[in-house]
Image (cartoon, helix red, strand yellow):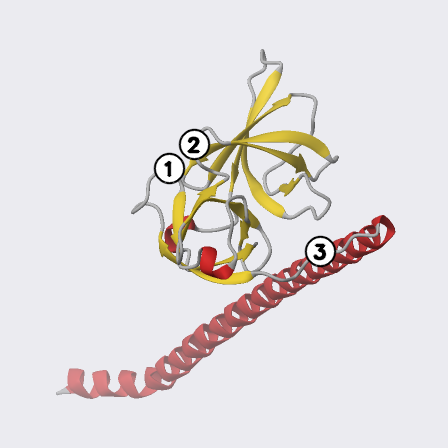
Amino acid sequence: MALTILDETIIRLISPLWTAENAFSQNLRNRVAFLQSQKNLVEENYALKERLLSLETQIESFSKDRNERDALLELLGRRQDSEGVLAAVLTRPPQTPYDVILIDVGSNASITSGSEVSLPEGPILGTVSEVFSKKAKVKLFSTSGEETNAILERGSVPVILVGRGGGNFKITLSRDITVEKGDRILSADVFSRLLAVVEDVSVNSTDSFKEILAKSPANLFSLRFVFVTP
């Protein structure tokens, strides 16, 4: 009985210590969780600010490029014809081979062989290769073996885009020419429309040239609409 009374006395004496320790531990865990939450919020806020700055820079660059292009066209006494036809894509790779798509407009909409085909957002994709009364075939620049004159935006370097299929291109350049992933490849005409974006740069230490892999800005496998300029 004396042992039981002693045990109860000890328990009564140390119970407040247990309670205080548990409260301290819980408070410490809450504090750590709060600090971690604050850290995560700071990191997320920083990432959002960086993303916003990047988007603002892109918008400013796009506006500047557009203003410069319009000024150049005015000086040349030319303007870009905005008239065209919005067409639905009926079939696309992989249903059609060799990066060919079939659209739902043809001679009934004044479409002719050679008419340019682009994304509604602007980037150019290819040209009409065959016309029917209500349909037309479009041969994309990325068709395997197809060669297209273009301009590497960085340094305004003339290049030849060689189609590799699946919306992919290959470019061969002198190893001395600076090019990086994300660089834009533009059409060689006065309108300088987007054709492709650099995906990879490969060069060996013993080579005089380097191979550039580029990709169309369009996902050919989910392409739904295109813009045709008769």
Q: Do the residues labelled 3 and 1 touch (CB within 8 Å)?
A: no
Quadrant containing the N terminus in the rendered view: bottom left
Above or below 135: residue 216:
above
Depth check, mark 3 against mark 1: the one in front is 3
> Which residue is depicted at the point 56% across and 66% down?
44
> Which residue is depicted at the point 47% across and 74% down?
28
Q: Mark 2 highlights which residue?
A: 144
Instruction: Name the one closer to the observer, 83 or 195.
Output: 83
Q: Mark 3: which amino acid?
A: Gln
Near mark 3 (Cα within 10 A), the count class, few <14, some 14-19 or many ≥20, is few
Instruction: Name the one closer to the observer, 21 or 8.
Output: 21
Quadrant containing the C terminus in the rendered view: bottom right
Report x, y in % for residue 198: 57, 38
The alpha-carbon separation of the residues under discs 3 and 1 comes to: 30 Å
Depth check, mark 2 against mark 3: the one in front is 3
The alpha-carbon separation of the residues under discs 1 and 2 comes to: 6 Å
Q: Mark 1: which amino acid?
A: Tyr
> Which residue is depicted at the point 35% across and 80% down?
18
Q: Mark 3 highlights which residue?
A: 80
Instruction: Name the one closer to the observer, 111 or 182.
Output: 111
Q: Mark 1 highlights which residue?
A: 98
Decide if residue 128 is on the left or right side of residue 22: right
Report x, y in % for residue 94: 31, 45
Report x, y in % for residue 66: 74, 57
